[in-house]
Image (spheres, helix red, strand yellow):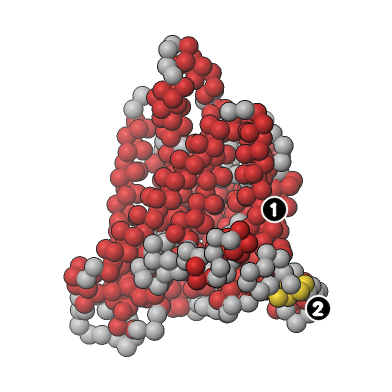
């Protein structure tokens, strides 16, 4: 006798497949249909390829994609570098005292609240601008570098950085403990490596390899981020969630097919990446 | 690096992390805070007055968020735990299906499925938002609970059954108690996913389901930073409380299960 009957097992597998795969597949189908003018109101009798032709002829979507990928890559690289530097500098102190708990605080912040915090700190008349006024660096709000609504996305990057760096720092600290990194490093130095070589050749590759799944998940989250780019970003260029939302749910109905074409193409991109990852994972599982 | 310098750096980092929280707290208590001043000129507690005008709309939003989070958490954790047991006997390939909802940004999901929700009459309803948040939380719960089902635990279940336990007893007497810690973390984190959510509430809820996150957004958009700060602090309270009780509750435990 088993805990779950075969029918029950099949039932849960069905629910699981529908909830995870089915909903995404339905999203893709609906976006594809809407991108060619089907299912729209008022109904259109003919096939409408304007969305896809705009997608491929104009540079709007490609600019958005490039902008989103660039901001994500910059944020990730800076966060990883900062976390590694802090790990090297602070070492065992990360686990002692109130700092050990304080580093968890950014995990408690919802993205909407992070946007509010970013606004309060980074805007022209925000707290940092006031501090720079108090020190005497600037004399009025306009002199403070505009980090919010900045086309270069500095406000978005800074706020995302503040949210992710502590997490990576905690993760690296856990990993270095788990991998017995201090022991490995001292072994490396005993074998004649300098401290720098030990970090570059032993510490860094091990940490990054172990953390790659987390880095990937956070990269995807940053790529699809919505609240922060919406509240702190410039109107142009914008990150992909904001661009898609503006085209689909904006006032200009003529933009809708283009918006759905963007949605469908991004979903296709994600599905391709996911299929590639699944296949690789499957092959890794088969290997002895 | 000297121990003293290291201590200064550590405290400095801690203070830096806490700075935005302090700024929100001060802002929520401020009445006027003109530009060059580092400190509010006039204070007021209006944003926090229990029966003030703002509270009458803030409290229902908080209750709605809370009930939504609890429902999503309970449903996702329960279903996720049962599903993960079925998946434990199947190939690991099935697990990659649970990664899909993580890759899709909620906005993209909501924008594409908005049509389907509207057709079902769920647009702008509490139930619609619940249904939209569930796949994300459920996928997370499946990945998290999958770690519980080691070979020993599966065999323990078989043993209990062969000793005469009924299936219900198996869940209540064996797996329930053994997985208690994990289920607690899972419940909290899936509830937090719903508590943090903004995109799904905004698009599937269509402005009719006012939760705290929507409230923060609306007040910030309307330019009232003080009210936004008050609502934001209510949003921050449960996760910060959890942090005081046990930081593990906030740790993204999912990550180990994803690694190939």
SS for callout 2: loop
Looking at the picture, does residue B242 appear above or below residue B4? below
Instruction: From the viewer's perspective, tell me whether residue A265 is left or right of residue B77.
Output: left
Q: Residue at x 63, y 33 (%)?
A: B6
Q: Earlier in the sequence, mark 2 or mark 1?
A: 2
Residue named by callout 2: B51
Q: Which residue is mark 1?
A: B240
Question: Are the residues under marks 2 and 1 on the same chain?
Answer: yes
- Residue B23 pos. (x, y %): 67, 61
Letter of the chain that mark 1 sits on in the rendering: B
Q: Quadrant of residue B50?
A: bottom right
Q: Position of residue B21 (x, y in %)?
A: 67, 57
Quarter where residue B126 is shown: bottom right
Using the image, determine if residue A110 lies above or below residue B203.
above
Q: Position of residue B3 (x, y in %)?
A: 65, 28
**Residue at the image point whose x is 41% and y is 45% from the top:** A77
Nearest the viewer among B117 and A209 is: A209
Which label belongs to residue A268?
none
- Tell me which residue sits at (51%, 65%) in the image: A144
Q: Indicate the quadrant containing the C terminus of chain A: top left, top right, bottom left or bottom right.
A: top left
Report the Cα–Cα distance between label 2 and label 1: 25 Å
């Amino acid at each position: 006798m088993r805990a779950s009957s075969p029918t029950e097992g099949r039932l849960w597998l069905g629910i699981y497949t529908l909830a995870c795969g089915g909903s995404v597949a339905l999203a893709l189908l609906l976006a594809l249909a809407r991108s060619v003018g089907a299912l729209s109101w008022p109904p259109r009798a003919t096939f409408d390829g304007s969305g896809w032709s705009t997608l491929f002829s104009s540079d709007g979507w490609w600019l958005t994609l490039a902008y989103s990928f660039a901001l994500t890559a910059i944020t990730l690289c800076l966060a990883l570098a900062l976390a590694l530097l802090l790990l090297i500098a602070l070492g065992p102190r990360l686990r002692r005292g109130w700092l050990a708990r304080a580093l968890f605080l950014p995990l408690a912040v919802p993205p909407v609240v992070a946007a509010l915090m970013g606004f309060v700190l980074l805007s022209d008349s925000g707290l940092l601008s006031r501090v720079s006024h108090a020190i005497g660096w600037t004399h009025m709000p306009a002199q403070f570098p505009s980090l919010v609504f900045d086309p270069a996305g500095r406000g978005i990057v800074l706020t995302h950085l503040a949210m992710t760096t502590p997490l990576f720092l905690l993760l690296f600290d856990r990993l270095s403990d788990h991998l017995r990194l201090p022991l490995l490093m001292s072994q490396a130095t005993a074998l004649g490596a300098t401290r720098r070589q030990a970090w570059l050749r032993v510490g860094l590759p091990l940490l990054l390899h172990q953390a790659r799944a987390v880095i990937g998940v956070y990269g995807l989250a940053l790529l699809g981020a919505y609240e922060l780019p919406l509240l702190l970003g410039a109107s142009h260029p914008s990150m992909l969630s904001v661009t898609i939302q503006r085209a689909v749910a904006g006032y200009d109905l003529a933009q809708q097919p283009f918006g759905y074409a963007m949605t469908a193409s991004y979903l296709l991109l994600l599905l391709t990446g996911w299929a590639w990852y699944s296949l690789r994972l499957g092959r890794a599982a088969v290997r002895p | 690096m000297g121990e003293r310098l290291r201590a200064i750096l550590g405290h400095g980092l801690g203070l830096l992390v806490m700075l935005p929280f302090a700024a929100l707290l001060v802002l929520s208590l401020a009445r006027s805070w003109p530009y060059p001043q580092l400190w509010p000129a006039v204070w007021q507690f209006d944003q926090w007055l229990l029966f003030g005008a703002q509270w009458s709309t803030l409290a229902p939003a908080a209750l709605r968020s809370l009930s939504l989070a609890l429902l999503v958490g309970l449903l996702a954790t329960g279903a996720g735990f049962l599903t993960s047991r079925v998946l434990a006997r199947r190939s690991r390939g099935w697990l990659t299906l649970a990664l899909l909802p993580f890759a899709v940004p909620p906005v993209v999901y909501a924008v594409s499925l908005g049509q389907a929700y509207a057709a079902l009459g769920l647009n702008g309803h509490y139930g619609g938002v619940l249904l939209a948040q569930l796949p994300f939380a459920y996928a997370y719960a499946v990945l998290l609970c999958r770690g519980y089902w080691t070979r020993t635990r599966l065999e323990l279940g078989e043993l209990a059954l062969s000793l005469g336990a009924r299936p219900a007893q198996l869940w209540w007497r064996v797996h329930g108690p053994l997985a208690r810690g994990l289920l607690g973390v899972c419940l909290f984190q899936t509830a937090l996913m719903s508590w943090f959510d903004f995109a799904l509430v905004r698009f599937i809820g269509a402005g009719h389901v006012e939760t705290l996150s929507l409230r923060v957004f609306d007040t910030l958009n309307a330019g009232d930073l003080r009210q936004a700060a008050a609502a934001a602090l209510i949003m921050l309270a449960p996760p910060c409380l959890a942090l005081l009780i046990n930081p593990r509750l906030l740790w993204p435990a999912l990550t180990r299960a994803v690694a190939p």
